[in-house]
Image (cartoon, rainbow, N blue to C red):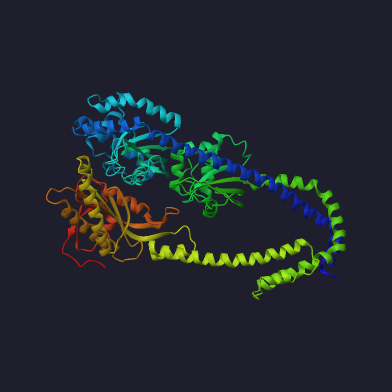
Amino acid sequence: MTRLSLVIVLVALISLAITSIVGLQRGGQIADTVLQARVTSLGATRADEVERYVGSLQRAAVGQAISPSTAQAINDFTDAYRELNSSQPSAADETAVNAFYADVIAPELADVRGRPVIATGLVPDADAAISLQAAYVVPSGEGDLVAGRGDGNDWFGLHRKLHEPFDEFTIQTGVDDLYLIEPAANTIVYSTAKDIDFGTSLLTGPQSGSALAVLIQSFDSSPEPGVAKVRDFTSYAAAGDEPSLFVAAPVYADGSLAGFVAMRIGPQRISSITTNNGSWTAEGQSGETYVVADDNLMRTDARPFLEDESAYLATASDLGNVTESQLRAMRTFGTTVLFQPINDNDVDAALELEPSLAETTSYLGVEVLQARRALTIDGLDWAMIADIEMQEIEQPVVDFARNLLITIALFLVTITFIAARWSDRLMRTPRIISSRLRAIRSGAGIEAEASSAAVPDGAPIEFVELAADIDTMLETLASRNADAAERAAERRRLLRRILPPQAAQRAEAGDRNVVDQVPHATVAVIVISGLGPLMRSGDSETARALLDQFVEEADALARQRGLERIRLTGDAYYAACGTVRPHIDHVARAASFVLDVQDLVRDLGGERGLISMTAGIDSGPVTVGLTGGADLAFDAWGPTVRHAADLSRMDGPNAIFATTTVQAQLPASFLTEPQPEGKMSNIVVISGRAHEEEPAR
């Protein structure tokens, strides 16, 4: 008895059991097809809407940028700003601004971040910024966003004339703020919302390291007209650390760069698309759509969060995949954007070029059917995910399968009879092809022509075509394997050129999330002061030359001391020791490096003291890894990096601030002294070395 005949007998004996199983499978297949199409279509529709919305923002920015009135407004506001900057602000304005930052802004940011925030590092240093923020930003009850409280400068007259059309533009486009930025020092000379970034320089001011500053500085000296750039959501201090997305475009007048127009968008705008403004009719009882990015965090709000925030936060806390700081941020800002992590495997699959569909576990631990599709938006590594719970899917499947049981049973009896008659004839050629495939799989080295040549004469045309397709498949596989090996070798060479050895090895192994926790490292942040006044005085070439020379020589000093530069944003230079190569004396190396840079800045500043520096040093755990999506970059971040950056913004020309943690690890050869009265107790000043030491290698 052949195997097929035995199967036929068994089918006849247990037909009822088989029909039940097949009925369930068939019903499940039909229901799955319908639901898969529904989920896939829903995700595709929402993805198209998000792409169109971001595209409309870019077109709106370009439309505003190419308007001659915008270029004229930037020139007029810039001239008025410089005139205002030439006069000393009143003592009352300075007092009001300093008090506002100390009593309102710093405490609010401290509550959001869960750590102390130094107000002096946020206060603008330009005289015009003090006057404008006193008139528009500091609450007084005496002015409004049109008139303000100032009337002694052309800037206020321009504002009364031009604010209304710009404000109407923000209402029509649905953005939270519109900026006009001059090109020399990237100063925000006009803003509709007038937050604490208003009037400040994005090159040297307190917002120089912000997402908006990075976006503006990403344009080269002669950016292409009519092209807008997008910066992904990130916490923005000027908006109270609320997640913000930025769009910017260059503005030209008579063929010359007049400045930039930029827009800030909060998280609610795009969330209203994926949530259909809170109406989930198309999603059913449990379905939802949301946007994720390559950092594995949401870019739109979660449906359960909007429906019941308290229950959502309790569930997320119980699952343990959300940190306390993320939970606090969700409560504070009323959004899951940038705070709700998503399974990294799901995000990796979603960012693939081809759409996909899979059963997986959602971010709340529920089994779901998930459709994924990457979004095609320049500058954003985003993907759309559509989920529907499996529990909602399974019930219609059971109902459908039950109704088909009798029909399936009759159908199977008929198929069994026919199969018994024709099994031998039909299976003759497939057995030959199957034997050839098993030989190929076992590595017998059979030539591609063998499969088609072995098909007997008179075989059905379908099997002949199948054998020919197998031959073509073998040839194609051989060609693709060779191409894949060549591309893999080229990628390994590229990674080894641009990344540290450890990161390159992990990236070569296919790890797309090369992120490590370094338990003991030291971070030094150096802020160069004096470049802003040079730029405002018109000597921008000298300022840029000083900055270029400083960076080149600081890099050399860092290599000499065993540090790596990890970031350069605006007037801030970030370096770290112990992140790529471990050093037992990483604290001493970092301190020696900063003292070397202090001498370098004195030499570069000359007798006039054109520039000065303030440095911050902290030691502790640091997170390092690859960032930037397709544009690979090695970076470091975490509380240690942020704390060092905060210290570098403290008031103290040519001072080196460090934490007591750093002080405890310094050799006795380093001279330290406590902070003056009124400063933070856990910060010391490094004043020098007791004797010169050999450079660390």
Locate residue 676, reporting x and y percent: 19, 47
The answer to whether one can see residue 565 in this image is yes
Q: Quick one: 39 or 452, which is closer to the camera?
A: 452
Locate residue 373, reporting x and y percent: 56, 48
Q: Quick one: 216 or 403, which is closer to the camera?
A: 216
Which quadrant holds residue 160? top left
Is 49 positioned to the left or the right of 541 in the image? right
Q: Residue at horizontal 33%, vertical 44%? A: 222
Q: Residue at horizontal 88%, vertical 63%? A: 421
Locate residue 134, reporting x and y percent: 27, 31
Quadrant placement of the N terminus: bottom right
Residue positioned most to the bottom: 444
Quadrant placement of the C terminus: bottom left
Is 333 positioned to the left or the right of 599 in the image? right
Locate residue 95, reporting x and y percent: 23, 33
In the image, residue 137 above or below residue 685: above
Q: Residue at horizontal 19%, vertical 30%? A: 90
